[in-house]
Image (cartoon, rainbow, N blue to C red):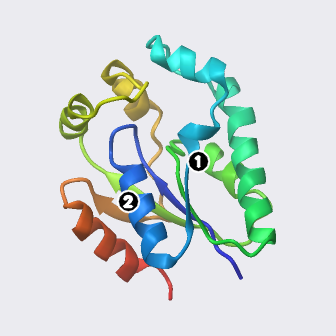
Amino acid sequence: MITPIIVMGVSGCGKTTLARALADALGATALDADDFHPAGNVEKMRAGTPLTDEDREPWLASLNAELRSRAALGERVVLACSALKQRYRDTLAADIAVMHWVFLDGNADEIAARMRAREGHYMPESLLRSQFDALERPTDAICISVSLTPVEQLQLALASLPK
C-alpha cells in the first residue's frame, strides 16, 4: 500500500527541506502544499493577513485529492504542509487508509530567526505568531526538533518511519 508522508509544522520550520530529503531517500515525489494555494491565499499572506479556516478548506481538499490521485497511481508522496489543526489533518487524510506524520517542532524565537534568513518566500515573519496560535500539536506524529541539522532530521525521520 502506498502511504503518504506529511511533514508538518509552522511556517519557517524546514518542512520543505525535510520533505525533499525524505522524498529523495525514499524514491518518492516531494510536493509542497504552498504550491497549491490559490492566488488569493498567497496575496492575503503576502499582505500579512492570516488565512481563515474558510480560506484553507478548498486548499486542503485539493491537497487530499492530489494525495489520493497519486496513491491510486502507485506513486509515493512526501508532502510539506503546515497542517496546523487537527481538522486540517483530518481533511488531508480523508479517504486515505494510512498516513505518516512528521512534525517539525521548535519555539517561536528559533523559527523566527530561520524565517529572517530565508529569501524569496511570501510568508512574512509577522504571521508566525498566528501560526503558533493555530497550532494543535499532533499526538500521532513523529516529533523532530528544528534544532537538529537537516541531516540529523532526515536520519531520525527515516529511522522512525515504518519500514
Which circle marks residue 153 in the picture? none
Vertical relation: 73 (above or below) 129 = below
- The local secondary structure at tag 1 comes to helix
Q: Is residue 103 left or right of residue 75?
A: left
Task: Identify which residue is drawn at 44% across, 60% down.
Answer: 20
* Image spot of residue 149 (x, y percent): 19, 61
Q: Mark 2 = which residue?
A: 18
Residue 90, relative to residue 59: is it above or below? below
Q: Amino acid at mark 1?
A: Gln
Choose mark 2 or mark 1, whichever is in front: 2
**Does label 2 or label 1 sit earlier along the sequence?**
2
What element does badge 2 sit on?
Answer: helix
In the rendered view, does 70 fall on the left or right side of 77? right
| Residue count near mark 1 (Cα–Cα under 10 Å), binned few <14, some 14–19, many ≥20 | some
Closer to us: 51 or 115: 115
Marking on residue 86: 1
- The image quadrant that residue 43 belongs to is top right
Disc 2 marks a residue whose amino acid type is Leu
Q: Position of residue 52 (x, y in %)?
A: 61, 22
Q: Residue at x 30, y 30 (%)?
A: 119
The relative height of residue 9 versus residue 12 in the rendered view (above or below) is below
Give the Cα distance between marks 2 and 1: 21 Å
